[in-house]
Amino acid sequence: MKNEVFARAMTEIDEELIVSAHKDIVQRPKRKKWIFAVAACFILICASALYLKNSNRIEILVYGNTIADQSVAVDIPAPLSSDLRYTIPDVITVPLEIQTERRLNIEADDTTIEVYSLKTDKLLYEGQVCETKESVTVLWTIEAPNPNQTYQLRLNDDAVLLLLSYDKDADNWILNKQ
Amino acid sequence: MALLEVAKIIFINLCNQTQKKLSITVMALLRKEKTPMDDKEIVKMYWQRNEEAIRETADKYGAYCRKISQNILSDVSDSEENVNDTYMQAWLSIPPHRPDSLMAFLGKLARNLALNRYKAAHAKKRFADQFAVSLDELSDCTPSKITVENETEVAELGKSISRFLYSQKEDIRNVFICRYFYCDSIEEISSRFGYSQSKIKSMLMRTRIRLKSHLKKEGYYEE
């Protein structure tokens, strides 16, 4: 038998070497696979959650400021006449900037909207219901506004609700976000 | 959305695997499968000349001995015979031996017996089986001053090789032992360690060169 001396000598190596080489064979691959699989799954779930969270985000700005929890006073032009009967305007137009990375569905009840592309300023839609996939400027128009009524602008099937109402104490129209 | 779907699939697969493992454990418990006996208990049974020792050895180390035998002999029936011879040899050797590591003891017995069978079967002809290929590789570093009949010198050479192996990195050491003690194929070693086959061959070649240098320093080669 060729190289028998070496082959026999290999049989005489330390037992500790024989055992540790075998343990390495048996244990390591399974352990590594399991750990990597769990880690990969965890990273994937976190990444997915983060992606969905960010992509769901709708940011609404009015007069350049983000609407958060507090109400925002709507800027109504001063009446031409000093006659107090004319403090309630014939038309209220609220300019909104809506920023989103996903599909956006806008619904206006009893009111109208003009939707312009934020990038190109091009008029995309005029009416009461609009669907778009980009960030837009919306001119929300309420004709003959009734101070006793609250007007709603619904985004993405009530995911976000904008409410326009008359604050009698502040003597002003205010915008709230829900 | 696609990411979420992929995450869902991976999570479900992991759950299925866990469930499968749990099912196997439960089934094993139901069948009342026993856990392998401790090595010290098995050696004690040998000393008590309790024949259950052989059954316990077969349960715990049967596959291990079979793998070593198969890697050298290739033939399945020869390997089975070799495994049976290993049990017999263990019965005859314990006592007087009281091995610290029953696994290593059985591994050495199985290997030696397999080498004897291999030598007898291949005395005249040269074969190109897996074991023969691994023996060919050892031509680089087989010392010229020792004969196989001198068991003391062969044992000393084994100790020298051990000293060399302890000085190597763990991965390199284990790859070398898998190839030249366990006689695993390059392919098997590659998949176990996660290295490419060319990397394994390269590791073994460089280790053999270093081993030769080590053995030269220890005076195993004629000048």
Image: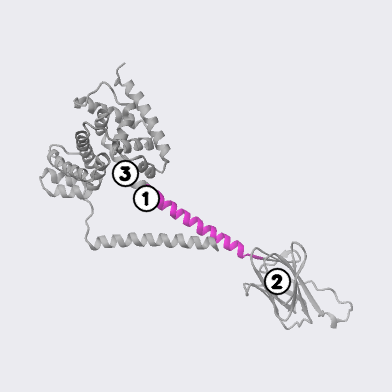
The local crowd at label 2, few if under 14, some if 14 to 19, many if 20 or more residues have their Cα within 10 Å, is: some
Report x, y in % for residue B175.
Answer: 35, 37
Give the answer, above or below, for where B60 lies relative to A14: below
- Residue A110's place in the image compared with B160, above or below, is below
Instruction: Return the residue found at the far right.
Output: A81
Q: Earlier in the sequence, mark 2 or mark 3?
A: 3
Relative depth, front residue between B127 and A92: B127
Where residue A111 sits in the image (x, y, percent)? 74, 79
Q: Amino acid at mark 2?
A: Ser
Residue denoted by label 2: A71
Q: Locate the C terminus of chain B by quadrant.
A: top left
Residue denoted by label 1: A30
Q: Tell me the amino acid under the disc marked 3.
A: Lys
Q: Which residues are magenta?
A: A29-58
Q: Nearer the viewer, mark 2 or mark 3?
A: 3
A66 left or right, relative to B73? right
- The circle on residue A23 is 3
* Residue in the image at 30% along x and 36% along y: B128
Dot placed on the residue nearer the N-terminal end, 3 or 1: 3
Q: Amino acid at mark 1?
A: Lys
Say which element carries label 3. helix
- Say which quarter of the image contains residue B106: top left
Q: Real-space Cα distance between discs 3 and 1?
A: 12 Å
Task: Identify the chain of the residue marked 3, using the numbered disc in the image.
Answer: A
